[in-house]
Image (tube, rainbow, N blue to C red):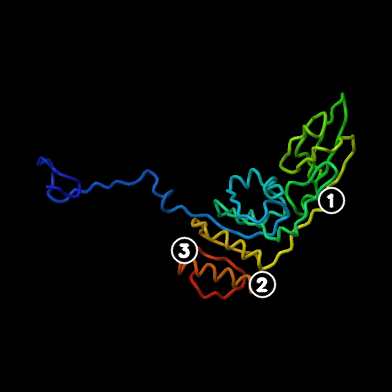
Amino acid sequence: MALGGGAFTARNKTLPGAYVNFISLARVGATFSERGTAAFALDLDWGLEDRVFTVTAAEFAKNSLSIFGYDYGHEKLKGLRDLFANAATVHAYRLGNPASHRHADCEYGAARFSGRRGNDLTLIITEGDNQYTVRTLLDGVLVDSQTVTNAEQLVDNDFVIWDDEAILTATAGIPFTGGENGEIGISDYQRFLAQIESYSDVNAIGVCSDNPQINSLFAGFAKRLRDQVGIKLQCVVFNHAADHEG
């Protein structure tokens, strides 16, 4: 007779009744209960433009300089440090109209990303034995150094895209100039929400704004995803009486 524990072929049980075997996955929590994924629209001085990019807490701790343009302890990253205090993963989006972003540059190349952070880059070129050592500094801190015979041999780094046709000459320091952040409007927030809607793993979405129209836009987005799409995320906005569990 088949019972909860399978088919028994012998009378080898101490007590009569149903014997049930419970079988579970090795790590059921990782599949069904893992949370900690946030989505956030950010006003940044550095980084990818007009696209959602994903950063884990470990990547933020190790590579914040190349991803966001500042080291982990910088005052500019205080909000992100607070965010990653509880979030394991963040789907980030850099606000600003890409058409109004400007890359800082100099005669030897341009900053990898647009924004005012590129204005803090400086090049120092020294000459010796028919070779040039090209050092890239950010806020006076060395972030890259290469020794080459001409500009064509320079390899793009995390901060600079080189001009292969430049003529290298020794210099005590050449600053990058002209970097600007893009202008931010409501359409930028709309582009973010349009892209993030396809991310079904988001547990919380937020925005730093005191604009009632923007906050209403985010609140309505969260309500629609919860009530119509079935994605039970939560939305964090400033001083907005949404009157909704999301």
Crowd band around label 1 with a 10 angstrom C-alpha radius: few (<14), some (14–19), many (20+)? many
Q: Is residue 29 left or right of residue 42?
A: left
Marks 3/2: CA–CA distance: 25 Å
Q: Mark 2: which amino acid? A: Asn
Secondary element at tag 2:
loop
Q: Where is residue 97 in the image (x, y as percent from the top left)?
A: 71, 61
Closer to the N terminus: mark 1 or mark 3? 1
Mark 1, residue position: 177
| The furthest residue to the front | 165
In the depicted structure, whether residue 60 falls above or below residue 197: above
| Mark positioned earlier in the residue sequence (3 or 2) | 2
Where in the figure is residue 6, as x and y percent of width and height?
18, 45
Task: Please name the residue that numbered disc 2 is placed on.
Answer: 211
Left or right? Give the position of 128 relative to 9. right
Q: Which kind of residue does numbered mark 1 sit on?
A: Thr
State the image quarter where residue 182 is shown: bottom right
**Vertical placement of 77 versus 10: above or below?**
below
User: Which tag, 1 or 2, sits closer to the chain's start?
Assistant: 1
Which residue is identified by label 3?
A: 232
Q: Residue 144: which quarter of the image?
A: top right
Q: Distance between the residues labelled 1 and 2?
A: 32 Å
| Up/down of 6 relative to 50, above or below | above
Say whether marks 3 and 2 touch (CB < 8 Å). no
Residue type at mark 3 is: Lys
Q: Is mark 1 on a helix, strand or loop?
A: loop
Marks 1 and 2 close (CB-CB < 8 Å): no
Residue 241 picture location, percent across and down? 57, 76
Q: Is residue 225 left or right of residue 125?
A: left
